[in-house]
Image (cartoon, rainbow, N blue to C red):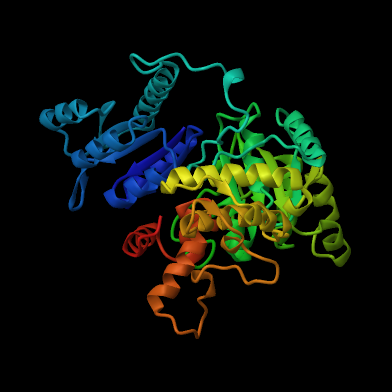
Amino acid sequence: MDILIVDDEKTIRDSTMVAIEAEGHYVEAVDGAQVALLRMQEEPFDVVFIDLRLGDDDGLEVLKQVRKRFPKVVPIVFTAYATVDTAVKAIQLGAMDYLEKPFTPADLRSYLVRAEKQRRLAESEPPPGSKPAAPVAQAKPAVSSGNKSLEKSPAPIFQSQDKSMQGIYDIVFRAADTQASILILGESGTGKSVLAREIHQRSHLKDKPFVTVHCPSLSKELLESELFGHVKGAFTGAVKDQWGKVHAANGGTLFLDEIGELPLDIQPKLLRLLQEREYERVGESTTRTTDIRVIAATNRDLRKDIESGDFREDLFYRLNVISVEMPPLRKRPEDLRILSEEFLQYFVRETGRNIRGFSRSGMARLTGYPWPGNVRELRNALERAVILAVGDEIESEDLPSPGTDYHSGEANLSIGSDSTLEELEAAHLKQVLEKSASLQEAAATLGIDQATLYRKRKKLGLK
């Protein structure tokens, strides 16, 4: 299970983490209510241990918030100040049980066993009065992956009129239900990460974690820690033990986005992970094992990188068990119209605009533009067009034309320009948030903690 500990005493956090890890569970620990709720909003946890005395925070109030906002989480309260009254209140508020400090590993183990049984029972029982789920065969082909970041976009379409795309979908979806590594090549914006998530959703691992590592987003040292984790004191800033994305993906899929940017020093460690399913955290000699499926993507020509010495040939062949190359949008004219109609209808619904389609000139501009940013650029262009269109049709002037610098005003912000610090900060935060798989990853890239990122995001009105 994935478990969160909320306690303001470091010794309790550390000792409880050790005991829970010894039982084979993934565990994190935080020292306050605000950070705990932010972390739970960012990542799904199965169980949360809540200390009833959290400095200025009331543990029972935290319990209320957990039950209200995260009803599937199994909460357990624990404290050194046990009373019958607080125990009763905790149970009434929805805690599974009440664990009194100090407790033994055996006590903790029994609570974990009960929590796991309760979690599985809750997952197996449909909500009261709910209707049976529709058979999968009746679902639309364009299914959502369930990722929160994708809910703000039209559901991805995995049907195509283009023969090369049909071949790609046939290959990867037949390979989806295996452990084979898959390498997705293609220009930026062609939908590599969306396809990777769909492969996971169509596999036997669909109920397991899907964890993304964006390789260019961090320095070599931080990227290695992001992947494999680290122990306290392994490097400057390593103030506590930390598990990495490999551990988080155990049993599921690890998606390595832009694998071509992976530093050469880390490549042998990734190769060992793929071959032996073994790794060590940074600063630790203990060898750990994992059971993961790896999907990688890149916009680089890895064969040229092999020739230049920037990418290991043995790692390439290990990743390249199943390989496909996503064609650019300009080579998929049949799909361009379908995608454009889907995006248009979606943004019309979202904005409430009365736009019925493309004019003749608008369609000519749409099909004549080369779309260097591929599907991502098409999506952004149509969102902008729907918002700014004057009439009830999308005209040619609403769309980008070859040779124009088609960017928003925000993208034109630059260091040294006539922009305020707040404008520059907002633009930078927005771009980092958009390319990051989680708030944790964004905070690491920006070099700030998650609570600070949350406050800045709220202040600047960013999502």
Judge left or right: residue 298 versus residue 218: right
* Residue plotted at (81% across, 45% down): 320
Front-lying residue, 257 or 237: 257
Front-lying residue, 165 or 434: 165
Front-lying residue, 214 or 263: 214
Judge left or right: residue 263 versus residue 376: right
Image quarter of residue 92: top left
Q: Look at the picture and state if 99 lies above or below 211.
A: above
Return the residue found at the far right: 307
Judge left or right: residue 20 versus residue 6: right
* Residue plotted at (59% across, 30% down): 206
Split into 4 quadrants, where in the image is the C terminus? bottom left
* Residue plotted at (45% across, 54% down): 439
Image position, residue 219 (x, y; %): 60, 66
Judge left or right: residue 322 versus residue 241: right
Front-lying residue, 282 or 2: 2
Tally the numbered discs. 0
Image position, residue 450 (x, y; %): 39, 57
Can residue 287 be seen by looking at this rendering? no
Image quarter of residue 275: top right
Q: Look at the picture and state if 224 lies above or below 111.
A: below
Image position, residue 64 (x, y; %): 22, 36
Can residue 63 be seen by looking at this rendering? yes
Return the residue found at the far left: 85
